[in-house]
Amino acid sequence: MDSVRNIAVLGSTGSIGRQTLDIIAEYPALFKAWLLVANNSADLLIEQALKVMPHAVVIGNEALYDKVKQALSHTDIEVHAGAKAIAQLAAHPDVDTVVTAMVGYSGLESTISAINNGKKIALANKETLVVAGELITKLLETSTSVLYPVDSEHGAFYQCLVGERHEDIEKLILTASGGPFRNTPIEQLAHVTASDALKHPNWSMGAKITIDSATMMNKGFEMIEAKWLFGVKHDDIEIVVHPQSIVHSMVQFIDGSVKAQLGLPDMHLPIRYALGLPERRLPTDERKMTLCDYASLTFEKPDFNKFPLLNAAYEAARRGGNVACVMNAANEIAVAAFLKGELSFNGIYETVYKTMQFIPFIETPTYEQYVETNLAARQYATSLLK
Ligand code: MG
């Protein structure tokens, strides 16, 4: 790291985006926030821009362009709007690293643009790999672009695999907190509300991922994310519930040895690690873990009956093609409806499962077919809500 690296933060106003700006601010000699992108949170985007003075900002929602432009008119900051501008600026020659921290499917187009332009990508938008892992993997093979995981579990796998041979991996052990309903009896899940689901025991995250964590869809997504990131079959990824969220994940090798990565449940850690790659770890004065504060670390099998979206994710991984894209699209619709109180907690799974059965299978989708699949699945899932 000789010169300051320009970072594009896609989704700067979300939970991961805000924490990424913390890390950029922690190392001003190494990083500069060159581009900030938000979808709808214009006020926070303006506030962030005035603080970090990026080269440019993009507001995804074009109706908010005038507001942002006006507020930044006394500065040199370029102001743009819309999805095309996001993809173009993420591919700008001055950008070194793109942090993809947008929510859901919306991350796909700009991630592809960044890959096609050889950017280093700190991947926080796991849905990109869930939706189109096969396509992304193919694009990476012919690009100088590299993907570094920001997800804490995948950061853990990455660290456990440093210095190891791929053929020595026996399985990946993906840890899960179990979410807020780990101890809730299965028959009560029909009555839980969005505010119950938003009380995550360990991690402070955005609303979408917190609901995904409560249904364990998030862990299913992470299984698929791991499959693509590390080239491991879904059968060789085991999910283990670890309520303390201290062991961020593990790798078991063919000689029976298991390596684990531990740390506090704080997203600053995996972001700091991802931004330091590939050169080095970045020193910090932030609070570090004292193992003695965690007298017991426990592990248990997940309950696939109680959290059937885990089954859906393994089914999507097994069937391949556009199935995970369908699953993700239906889940986005269902979670939004649940957050608005328009769908029950168990209704999330029902919506996802029915949509997965309905949408026609495509074995090797093109980008356009992913776009069509996403749209069709959203429409069908929405029709189920009526
Ligand atoms: Mg995670």
Image (spheres, rainbow, N blue to C red):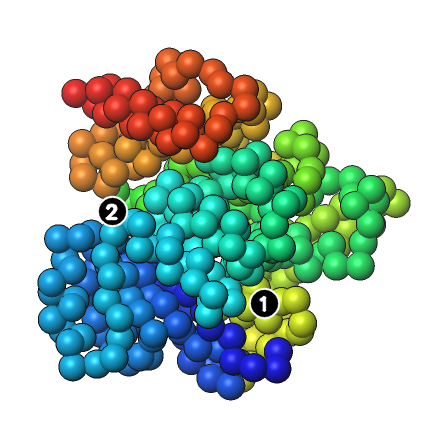
Q: Quadrant of residue 275?
A: bottom right
Please tell me whether residue 351 is drawn above or below residue 13 in the rendered image.
Answer: above
Q: From the viewer's perspective, is 65 left or right of 300?
A: left
At x 29%, y 31%, the residue is: 334
Please tell me whether residue 184 is drawn above or below residue 312 in the rendered image.
Answer: below
Single out the residue that lies furthest toward the front: 93
For the residue marked with disc 2, what is the amino acid? Ser
Gap in angstroms between the C-alphas marked 2 and 1: 32 Å
Please tell me whether residue 269 is drawn above or below residue 116 in the rendered image.
Answer: below
Q: Earlier in the sequence, mark 2 or mark 1?
A: 2
Say which residue label 1 marks. 273
Task: Estimate the x, y position of residue 6 in percent, counting from the top left.
Answer: 47, 73
Q: Could you say which is closer to the camera, residue 216 or residue 163? A: 163
Q: Residues within 10 Å of mark 1 (few under 14, many from 20)?
A: many
Specify the label residue 80 is tagged with.
none
Q: Is the CB atom of the residue marked by disc 2 within 8 angstroms of ligand 1's nearest atom?
A: no
Quadrant of the drawing holding the N terminus = bottom right
Single out the residue that lies furthest toward the right: 255
At x 51%, y 75%, the residue is: 5
* Secondary-structure class at tag 1: helix
For the residue marked with disc 1, what is the amino acid? Tyr
* Secondary-structure class at tag 2: helix
Say which residue label 2 marks. 195
Quadrant of the drawing holding the C terminus = top left
Whether tag 2 and tag 1 are in contact, CB under 8 A, the answer is no
**Residue 230 visible (yes or no):** yes
